[in-house]
Amino acid sequence: VVVVVVVVVVVVVVVVVVVVVVVWGENPTLRAAAPVVIVVIVVVVVVVVVVVVVVVVVVPVITVVLTVVAVVEVLVL
């Protein structure tokens, strides 16, 4: 799952950067702003990846922990 997410993100980033470079290359004003736009896009992508990874990793962990706690409670009580 994580590998798929990473691959998709990389593809999206590459496509977006190419589009930005091509489109922005036509306009001097936008060309000056391109680095800012790319940084913003990269930050957004990183945040999305982190959130997805956290959800994919943390949710099962929490589920397991809660299950273990429930089992221990039953055994102890």
Image: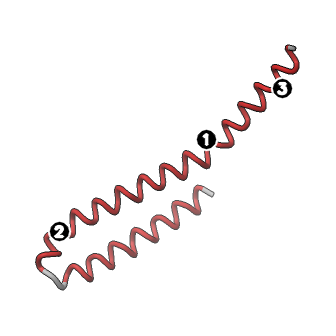
Report the residue at 61% width, 41% height from top: 58
Left or right placement of residue 13 versus residue 77 in this view: left
Instruction: Kindly identify the amino acid type of the residue bearing the numbered disc 3.
Output: Val
Describe the element under mark 2 as helix, strand or loop: helix
Any mark on residue 13, and which? none
Structural distance between the alpha carbons of marks 1 and 3:
20 Å
Circle 1 residue: 58
Instruction: Kindly identify the amino acid type of the residue bearing the numbered disc 1.
Output: Val
Disc 1 packing (10 Å; few <14; some 14–19; many ≥20): few
Which picture quadrant has residue 38?
A: bottom left
Any mark on residue 33, and which? 2
Report the residue at 18% width, 85% height from top: 26
**Viewer-closest of 47 and 77:** 77
Pointer 1 or 3: first along the chain:
1
Report the residue at 40% width, 68% height from top: 13
Structural distance between the alpha carbons of marks 3 and 2:
57 Å
